[in-house]
Image (spheres, helix red, strand yellow):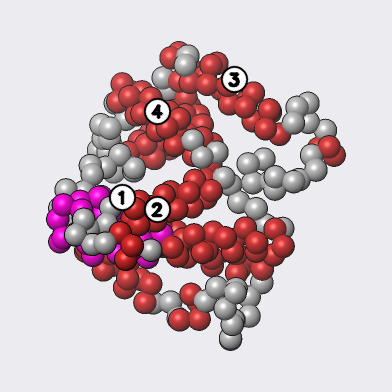
């Protein structure tokens, strides 16, 4: 339901409520009856439900709700000792142990410490650039540009653009923390420039994704939040985080 077009005619679905109200109703019921009930949520099945609910919030563009839901799941996982993964002496793991391990890693995969030094994002960016170089130049062409030599279906082209979107999003996140220090330290000016370039690329792809195939393909609303974040970064880069020694008029 999250991936339906906003102008989709839902009358033929026979739903008891409109799509938005049904999603809100279902979310509220899961939140109240499962997630906030420790007897149900304090289990492998309950944590799996928490993971799905967090993904649902993320797709709706509610990062705070997604984060608090994941933190609740993480605390439940610690109480269940999911972080204490032990391999049986036989060397083979039963299915339930594999499930416990998978649930734990789904929770902690995004719970990393913030980057403290400039070397780590630089190394990651070099790896990202190396991976990008493996793709032929025509793969990076957008539909508004001449698609010479490209023979792909609409879905393949859409998937390619979505992959490009994720690529530039990674280029934003890597230098973002260091970009915020550029006003007080000129060494980080390069990070600011890279972040702004990637943000502009994301916005360009986002605009074309919305117009792609006459609007017949829709994606979840999380991409709207990501594009909004890229837009805010561009605005901050132009107005709030430029070097103080430069004339503001030169940044437009």
In the picture of the structure, the residue carrying the numbered disc 1 is 240
Q: Tell me if residue 172 is in the magenta stretch.
A: no
Query: How many other residues sit within 10 Å of disc 1, few (<14), some (14-19) or many (≥20)?
Result: some
Compute the Cα span from label 1 to label 3: 42 Å
Mark on residue 235?
2
Mark on residue 152?
none
In the picture of the structure, the residue carrying the numbered disc 4 is 68
Q: Residue at x 59, y 20 (%)?
A: 29
* 146 vs 130: above or below: below
Indicate which disc, 4 or 3, sits on the residue closer to the N terminus.
Answer: 3
The image shows a total of numbered marks equal to 4
Tag 4 secondary structure: helix
Compute the Cα span from label 2 to label 3: 39 Å
Q: Is residue 4 left or right of residue 243?
A: right
Compute the Cα span from label 4 to label 3: 17 Å
Q: Residue at x 43, y 53 (%)?
A: 230
Tag 2 secondary structure: helix
Q: Is residue 55 in sight in this rendering?
A: no
User: What is the x, y in percent for residue 153?
Assistant: 66, 72
User: What is the x, y in percent for residue 87?
Assistant: 27, 38
* 238 vs 136: above or below: above
Contact check, label 2 and label 1, Cβ < 8 Å:
yes
User: What is the x, y in percent for residue 2?
Assistant: 63, 41
Indicate which disc, 2 or 1, sits on the residue closer to the N terminus.
Answer: 2
Of labels 4 and 3, the one closer to you: 4
Compute the Cα span from label 4 to label 1: 29 Å
Query: How many other residues sit within 10 Å of disc 4, few (<14), some (14-19) or many (≥20)?
Result: few
């Amino acid at each position: 339901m999250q991936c339906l077009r906003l102008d989709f005619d839902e009358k033929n679905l026979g739903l008891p409520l409109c799509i938005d109200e049904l999603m809100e109703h279902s979310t509220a019921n899961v939140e109240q009856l499962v997630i906030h009930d420790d007897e149900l949520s304090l289990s492998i099945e309950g944590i799996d439900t928490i993971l799905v609910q967090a993904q649902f919030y993320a797709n709706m563009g509610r990062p705070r709700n997604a984060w608090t839901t994941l933190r609740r799941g993480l605390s439940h996982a610690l109480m269940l000792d999911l972080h204490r993964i032990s391999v049986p002496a036989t060397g083979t793991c039963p299915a339930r142990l594999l499930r416990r391990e998978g649930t734990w890693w789904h929770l902690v995969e995004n719970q990393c410490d913030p980057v403290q030094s400039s070397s780590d994002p630089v190394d990651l960016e070099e790896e990202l650039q190396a991976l990008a170089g493996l793709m032929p130049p025509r793969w990076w062409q957008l539909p508004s540009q001449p698609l010479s030599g490209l023979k792909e279906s609409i879905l393949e082209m859409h998937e390619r653009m979505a992959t490009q979107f994720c690529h530039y999003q990674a280029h934003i996140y890597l230098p973002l923390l260091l970009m915020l220090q550029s006003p007080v330290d000129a060494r980080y000016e390069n990070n600011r420039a890279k972040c702004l370039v990637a943000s502009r690329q994301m916005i360009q792809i986002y605009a074309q994704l919305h117009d792609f195939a006459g609007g017949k393909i829709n994606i979840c609303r999380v991409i709207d939040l990501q594009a909004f974040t890229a837009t805010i970064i561009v605005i901050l880069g132009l107005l709030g985080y430029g070097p103080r020694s430069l004339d503001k008029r030169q940044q437009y």
